[in-house]
């Protein structure tokens, strides 16, 4: 297998040195011959950092395991192999008026990856994270046994595996509960806001009135335009399409340019055009689900535009009580560093609790920033926004990360020792090696196991 296919989406970390097939990994696990730290399940490589990498061992290509096993058109419960991409699930369930209750910003994540990262979407305030809709899954561990995990069976493994970043074993298949929708189309409304204060005034009411809500920030705007943006709200249209659109893209970036195309002049022009086009009418309009949920999927390999050094994505969440102070501070830190973010997204998390031990979403506001990798200059900025986030009582998203320190991870996820206690010794990631393994694992695991 060519290792070039097994990198992270951020392109800022080296791709996997070795990959094996799911069948090979399953045989090793069932025979008890896999060595410690040698494996990590790999879906479609949509994680931005190194949580999908294992420099110490091999990644397991789960994509060939992509069969939809069953679907109940009355209850909306669908069972599929772990390598099944979300786009296939959408296409299968659409004629029956069902849609995943939670979708992230790309339809190309696999079912196993969505569970392992406990992904979230534009409706966390109503539906919580992906893990809230997992009925059960089968997990293969290095003792050779296959465990059925649910809220009633192997509950500790169930909760550790959701959001466990692939460290508890190999998810083989899973059952999830989809939600019934009147159509796949979305009635979308774009509301301009002048600054962050106006956004915060609008956000809670927008969440209460709509299934989906998310804001785009013009991160480069200064002066009187600082903090301006668009608040997008949406609900499934009562009358619309019940057919999934083709998941492929006609547009692509066929080769990686030798430099970062998304520079400041480009971003300034793009932001102005985007704000004008999307915000020119406050009247709701009916749009296809792909454009609403997965706009960047419309350009295949768009991450190549960042050049050979790739990008770092930073996603933070801060408590609601601190958000009006902290979110502007995070954006100001980027401006002072002279760094422009191509994609700057702000949204409100609700209080729907995930079953996961380690789940990134929690009540508050979450800000996502994309920065081209400019080496030490960018790393200093990311460390600074880590500091601002943690001091505000917030957290940094691990599956979007490629460089946070162990202390930031521990502050973001104080229960990390509980996952370490349940981690399958055969499974390890570069992220876990970089963060948790550098903390006092011995003492933490002993305390967690008591």
Image: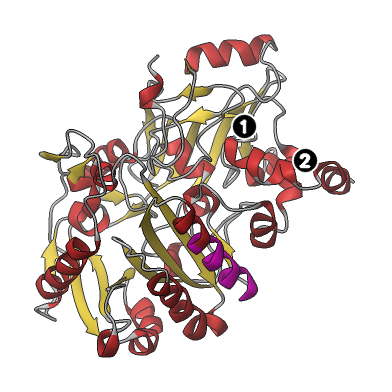
Task: Tell me if I can see residue 67 in this picture.
Answer: no
The dominant secondary structure in magenta is helix
Q: Which residue occupies the foreground of this view, 188 or 184?
A: 188
In the depicted structure, whether residue 432 falls above or below residue 59? below
Check disc 2 and report its element: helix, strand or loop.
helix
What residue is at 58 percent from the left and 64 percent from the top?
395
Q: Which residue occupies the foreground of this view, 380 or 155?
A: 380
- Residue 425 badge: none
In the depicted structure, whether residue 66 falls above or below residue 291? above
Q: Position of residue 55 (x, y in %)?
A: 57, 28
Residue 211 lies left or right of residue 162; in this view the side is: left
- Residue 421 badge: 2
Residue 439 lies left or right of residue 241; in this view the side is: right
Q: Which residue is mark 1?
A: 148
What residue is at 25 percent from the left and 72 percent from the top?
232
Specify the segment rendered in magenta. 381-392
């Amino acid at each position: 297998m060519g290792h070039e296919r097994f990198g992270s989406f951020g392109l800022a970390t080296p791709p996997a040195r070795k990959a094996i097939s799911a069948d090979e990994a399953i045989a090793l696990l069932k025979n008890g011959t896999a060595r410690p730290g040698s494996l990590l399940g790999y879906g479609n490589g949509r994680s931005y950092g190194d949580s999908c990498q294992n420099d110490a061992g091999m990644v397991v290509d789960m994509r060939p395991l992509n069969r939809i096993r069953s679907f109940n058109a009355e209850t909306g419960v669908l069972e599929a192999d772990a390598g099944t991409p979300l786009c296939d699930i959408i296409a299968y369930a659409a004629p029956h008026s069902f849609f995943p209750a939670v979708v992230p910003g790309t339809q190309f994540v696999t079912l196993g990856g969505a569970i392992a990262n406990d992904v979230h979407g534009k409706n966390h305030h109503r539906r919580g994270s992906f893990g809230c809709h997992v009925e059960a899954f089968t997990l293969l561990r290095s003792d050779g046994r296959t465990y059925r995990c649910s809220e009633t069976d192997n509950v500790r493994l169930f909760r550790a595996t959701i959001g466990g970043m692939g460290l508890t074993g190999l998810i083989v298949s899973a059952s999830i509960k989809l939600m019934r929708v009147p159509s796949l189309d979305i009635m979308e409304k774009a509301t301009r806001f002048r600054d962050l204060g106006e956004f915060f005034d609008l956000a809670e009411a927008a969440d209460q009135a709509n299934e989906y809500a998310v804001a785009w920030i013009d991160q480069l705007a200064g002066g009187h335009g600082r903090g301006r943006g668009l608040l997008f709200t949406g609900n499934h249209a009562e009358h619309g399409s019940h057919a999934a659109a083709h998941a492929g893209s006609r547009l692509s970036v066929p080769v990686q340019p030798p430099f970062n195309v998304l520079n400041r002049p480009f971003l300034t022009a793009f932001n102005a055009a985007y704000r004008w086009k999307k915000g020119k009418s406050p009247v709701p309009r009916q749009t296809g689900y792909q454009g609403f949920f997965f706009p960047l999927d419309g350009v295949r390999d768009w991450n190549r535009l960042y050049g050979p050094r790739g990008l770092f994505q930073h996603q933070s969440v801060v408590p609601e009580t601190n958000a009006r102070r902290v979110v502007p501070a995070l954006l100001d830190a980027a401006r002072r560093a002279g760094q422009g973010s191509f994609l700057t997204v702000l949204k409100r998390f609700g209080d729907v609790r995930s079953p996961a031990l380690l789940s990134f979403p929690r009540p508050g506001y979450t800000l996502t920033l994309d920065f081209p990798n400019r080496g030490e200059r960018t790393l200093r900025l990311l460390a600074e926004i880590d500091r601002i986030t943690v001091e505000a009582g917030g957290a940094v998203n691990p599956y979007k990360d490629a460089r946070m320190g162990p202390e930031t991870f521990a502050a973001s996820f104080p229960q990390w020792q509980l996952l370490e206690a349940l981690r399958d010794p055969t499974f390890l990631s570069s992220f876990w090696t970089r963060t948790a393994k550098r903390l006092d694992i011995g003492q933490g695991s002993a305390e967690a196991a008591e």
